[in-house]
Image: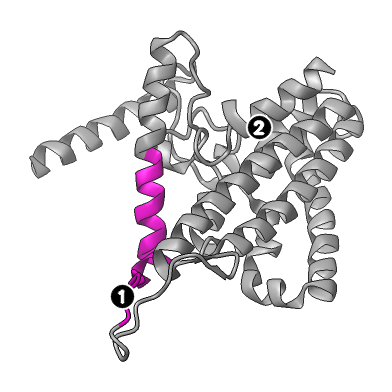
Amino acid sequence: MSKIAERLYNGIVKENPIFVLLLGICPTLAVTTSAGNGLGMGLSSMVVLALSNALISALRHLIPSRVRMPAFIVIVASFVTIVQFLIQGYLPSLYDQLGIYIPLIVVNCIILGRAESFASKNPVVLSFFDGIGMGLGFTLSLVFIGAVREILGSGAVFGVQILPLADAASGKAGYTPISIFVLAPGAFLILALLVVIMNVVREKQEAKGKPLAKGNGCLSGECSSCSLSSTCGGKTLSSETEDPLVKKAVENLKAKQNTTEEVKA
């Protein structure tokens, strides 16, 4: 039981996919125009995460290592298709809001990352609850970001008006919505602020001797530590490789980067 609780805590707090690991940034920026959209995307991803983790774990000894990523994608795509049809059939308004981002759950780096780093190496039950924990962390993060954007952009949350709006015609005082926060630039502003806050929290936790997991998403600027760098196009290579040709290529790349930085300076 303690291991299950640890998996849930790990996904929600210690390795929160958005605020700690900086994964799943694209859907985070795209769908958090409201808290409701964030909740829908988060719960959809959680269902896919939990079920795909469980099935991948059950088949981990049967899937050849050389085809594991294609196999993971097929499994994830199957569950995503089921979730997509269910949302389209029973929640058409949510389906219209999320649009293309529902099928794109297939290539969400959170799901593929947990399949590669945890589900393929651990028992079914732990893998299932790891998916639940990471899904809850993802859902809570999306809802929080969506709620902040919705309140600032319209004075409402989940469609409920919590800040009385100003009425210029009648001279009624009230809140004037900052519409930029429900547009694309608002997503970047909110996410940037949250990343800054998370960095402060990370430093304080490290000072207490309780470090959080290191970010390995696209915002961290380092692909070599990411288990999916070979599938997402990451170009960073480890300089510790023993292949002399690769080492030479890395040295040349670093030299070019240094030259470019000197020219810019």
Task: First in sequence, mark 2 or 1: give its number.
Answer: 2
Question: How far across and how far down the image is residue 239, in percent?
Answer: 41, 21
- Numbered disc in front, either 2 or 1: 1
Point 66% across, 60% down: residue:
104
- Closer to us: 258 or 248: 258
Q: Residues within 10 Å of mark 2 (few under 14, many from 20)?
A: many
**Can residue 60 be seen here?**
yes
Q: In the visual, does 27 lie left or right of 99?
A: left
Q: Residue furthest top?
A: 209
**Disc 2 secondary structure class:** helix
Q: Which mark is residue 31?
A: none
Q: Is residue 233 above or below residue 198?
A: below
Residue indicated by mark 2:
11
**Bounds of the magenta segment:** 172-195
The stretch drawn in magenta includes residue 174: yes
The Cα atoms of the two marked residues, 2 and 1, are separated by 43 Å
Q: In the visual, does 82 lie left or right of 68?
A: right
Residue indicated by mark 1:
173
